[in-house]
Image (spheres, rainbow, N blue to C red):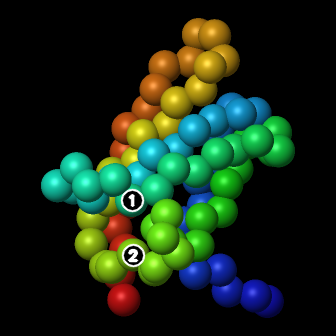
Amino acid sequence: HEVFEGVRFANLTQTADIRVLTVSGRFVTELEETDGDGGFQWDLRDRGGQRIKPGVYIYHVSTEQEGIKPFIGTFTVVE
């Protein structure tokens, strides 16, 4: 049984954009769900390839699919 160290985003539309920011508003990375399975696994690495630090993060999910509103949530990374 392999352990995944990261975040799993679930219940996404077939295509979705996920923007991750720190609670102070600093951009961390942008992720894209494109394979149509409605899920995305992120390895907690920023756009520069560095693992993010423990803390609280904000994510914003959006899609171009008609009738679906953007969603904003939070998650916490612990050591």
Kindly tell me whether residue 40 is visible in this rendering.
yes
Depth check: 21 or 69 in front?
21
Residue placed at 50% from the left, 37% from the top? 61
Q: Are marks 2 and 1 in contact (CB under 8 Å)?
A: yes
Where is 8 relative to 33, above or below?
Answer: below
Residue placed at 44% from the left, 32% from the top? 71
Residue placed at 75% from the left, 33% from the top? 14
Q: Which residue is mark 2?
A: 52
Q: Quadrant of residue 78?
A: bottom left
In the image: residue 69, left or right of residue 4:
left
Q: Which amino acid is tagged 2?
A: Ile
Q: CA distance from mark 2 to mark 1?
A: 8 Å
Where is 63 relative to 75, above or below?
Answer: above
| Whole-percent x, y for residue 54 in the image | 31, 79
Residue 28, label in figure:
1
Q: Which quarter of the rendering shows the C terminus? A: bottom left
Where is 23 relative to 54, above or below?
Answer: above
Q: Quadrant of residue 56?
A: bottom left
